[in-house]
């Protein structure tokens, strides 16, 4: 049996069934180095309030350094008797510093303020790492947009042909939400940068500790204003879980389009062999598994978020052991995105957009009907009438199995005398996109500006 963190008022050790339920080292061990960093800061705090002398502090820090080295090398690891990361590391400290010195570190702190602090430290590091991976995906989208130049594709609403758009415009429409996800991560960090250390079990400490000094040493901006809040709140974890789920959902929407685009029916995109999989039975198959896994894992991250919210709902203040359940879901979200993002980035960076196929389909499905209506509006026709007249053109074409530009001048005049031959100037996809030249529109001049702004923005993030 290991060293328990309590015992005085107990007559025996925990039941095997309790220990099996309670143990968390299989997932919280990843916090070990943060726990040791917290211990160093706490030891200095104990020195400042006179609870350790210089020699004791030096002995404590030396033992913590030795312990950390063995944690990194794997020489020190939790045993089955260690309940959690804190229990294991206190055992390690006592093994190295002796029971008298090692047993002094726990004064004034509780696993409740420790764990609340460690999870913030860990998640802040992970959020920074993930933000970099999201920006890699953004860069891949921006590079593809730049490479697409003025290529045109069918823009869709309801997945039906709507209006032609630049391929670059569409790809950048996936880059902007991902940049907002990175902005969210940065904004989240301002709330995560507040340290609960010093809150104790729930009410603070009697020992004269200085939470602000510990906060500063651990890289936080400040210490919590309320020790009950500090130990009980997990909204910081839930908020990050949302941002990670949102990021996964944004990747999933991109992936869904890539899945559709890579079908024979669309043929807009060809995935690189390195980012495609084959079939064990059908020799001809080339499947977009990266995109499908992105779509599937988005569901998993949504589950991670909702699971945590369900844990928090109706949980009274202050600490309750339910809060141990915050970790596995958010760790799962972090781990999942960390493997997903590089795969999606690689898939996007190496996919080939088939310009001819997109150009061929762009004008089909009467995608220029709005241009006809807006041409009429520019010649003074009320939009309600213009909409009707353009709709009549579509009806006439559908009846004859032809496209809008195949109508003759006589056909147009027969549908409505206001459809003068000049309408032909808007019956090309190039004319259509060029005309959408307001800020944020798909005109090539605007998309070039947008591309520059996207590059600038991603470089700032
Ligand atoms: N392992 C716990 C957690 O993850 C921290 C320990 C607090 N336990 C307690 N009985 N007060 O939240």
Image (tube, rainbow, N blue to C red):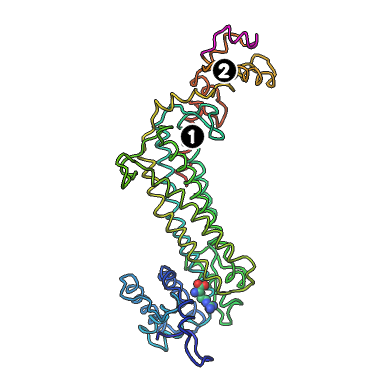
Q: Is residue 55 above or below residue 39?
A: below
Task: Residue at the far top: name it.
Answer: 410
Note whether residue 202 is visible.
Answer: yes
Q: In the figure, residue 306 lies in which quadrant?
A: bottom right
Q: Residue 399 carries which label?
A: 2
Given contact means CB atoms under 8 Å apart, are the residues at marks 2 and 1 in contact?
no
Near-viewer residue (403 or 199):
403
Report x, y in % for residue 134. Answer: 44, 48
User: Distance between the Cα atoms at labels 2 and 1?
Assistant: 32 Å
What numbered label is drawn on residue 314?
Answer: none
Say above or below: 180 vs 229.
above
Q: Which residue is drawn at 55% across and 25% down?
A: 437
Give the mark nearer the N terminus: 2 vs 1. Answer: 1
Location of residue 2 by image quarter = bottom left
- 286 or 354: nearer the viewer: 286
Q: How crowded is mark 1: few (under 14 residues within 10 Å), some or many (20 or more)?
A: some
Quadrant in which the N terminus appears: bottom left
Q: What element carries label 2?
A: helix
Q: Nearer the viewer, residue 265 or 214?
A: 265
- Tell me if residue 114 can be seen: no
Residue 68 appears left or right of 215: left
For disc 2, the neighbor class at 10 Å (few under 14, some 14 to 19, many from 20) is: few
Give the residues drawn in magenta, as a range: 406-418
At mark 1, the secondary structure is helix
Circle 1 sits on which residue? 170
Q: Which residue is drawn at 37% across and 43% down?
A: 287
x and y, in percent, of residue 125 in the image: 44, 60
């Amino acid at each position: 049996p290991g060293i328990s963190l309590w015992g005085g008022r107990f007559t025996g050790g925990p039941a095997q069934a309790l220990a099996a339920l309670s143990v968390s080292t299989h997932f919280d061990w990843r916090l070990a180095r943060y726990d040791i960093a917290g211990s160093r800061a706490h030891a200095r705090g104990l020195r400042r309030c006179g609870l350790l002398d210089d020699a004791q502090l030096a002995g404590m820090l030396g033992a913590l350094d030795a312990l950390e080295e063995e944690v990194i090398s794997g020489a020190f690891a939790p045993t089955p008797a260690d309940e959690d990361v804190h229990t294991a590391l206190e055992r390690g400290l006592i093994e190295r510093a002796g029971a008298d010195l090692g047993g002094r570190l726990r004064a004034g702190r509780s696993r409740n303020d420790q764990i609340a602090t460690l999870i913030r430290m860990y998640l802040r590091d992970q959020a920074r790492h993930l933000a970099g991976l999201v920006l890699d995906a953004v860069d891949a989208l921006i590079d593809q947009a730049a490479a697409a130049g003025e290529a045109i594709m069918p823009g869709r609403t309801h997945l039906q042909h709507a209006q032609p758009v630049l391929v670059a415009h569409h790809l950048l429409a996936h880059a902007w939400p991902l940049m907002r996800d990175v902005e969210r991560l940065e904004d989240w960090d301002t709330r995560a940068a507040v340290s609960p250390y010093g809150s104790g079990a729930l009410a603070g400490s009697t020992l004269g500790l200085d939470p602000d000094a510990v906060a500063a040493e651990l890289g936080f901006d400040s210490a919590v204003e309320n020790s009950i809040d500090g130990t009980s709140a997990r909204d910081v974890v839930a908020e990050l879980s949302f941002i990670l789920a949102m990021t996964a959902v944004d990747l999933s929407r991109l992936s869904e389009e890539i899945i559709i685009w890579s079908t024979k029916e669309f043929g807009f995109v060809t995935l690189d062999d390195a980012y495609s999989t084959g079939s064990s039975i059908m020799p001809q198959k080339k499947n977009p598994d990266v995109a499908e896994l992105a779509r599937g894992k988005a569901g998993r991250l949504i589950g991670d978020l909702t699971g945590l919210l369900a844990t928090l709902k109706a949980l009274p203040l202050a600490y309750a052991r339910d809060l141990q359940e915050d970790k596995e879901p958010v760790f799962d979200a972090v781990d999942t995105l960390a493997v997903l993002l590089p795969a999606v980035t690689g898939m996007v960076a190496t996919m080939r957009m088939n310009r001819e196929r997109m150009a061929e389909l762009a004008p089909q499905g009467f995608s220029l009907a709005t241009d006809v209506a807006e041409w009429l509006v520019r010649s003074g026709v009320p939009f309600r009438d213009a909409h009707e007249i353009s709709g009549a053109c579509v009806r006439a074409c559908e009846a004859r199995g032809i496209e809008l530009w195949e109508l003759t001048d006589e056909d147009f005049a027969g549908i409505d005398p206001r459809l003068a031959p000049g309408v032909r100037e808007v019956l090309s996809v190039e004319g259509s996109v060029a005309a959408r030249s307001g800020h944020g529109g798909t005109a090539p001049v605007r998309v070039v500006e947008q591309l520059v702004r996207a590059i600038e923005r991603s470089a700032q993030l």
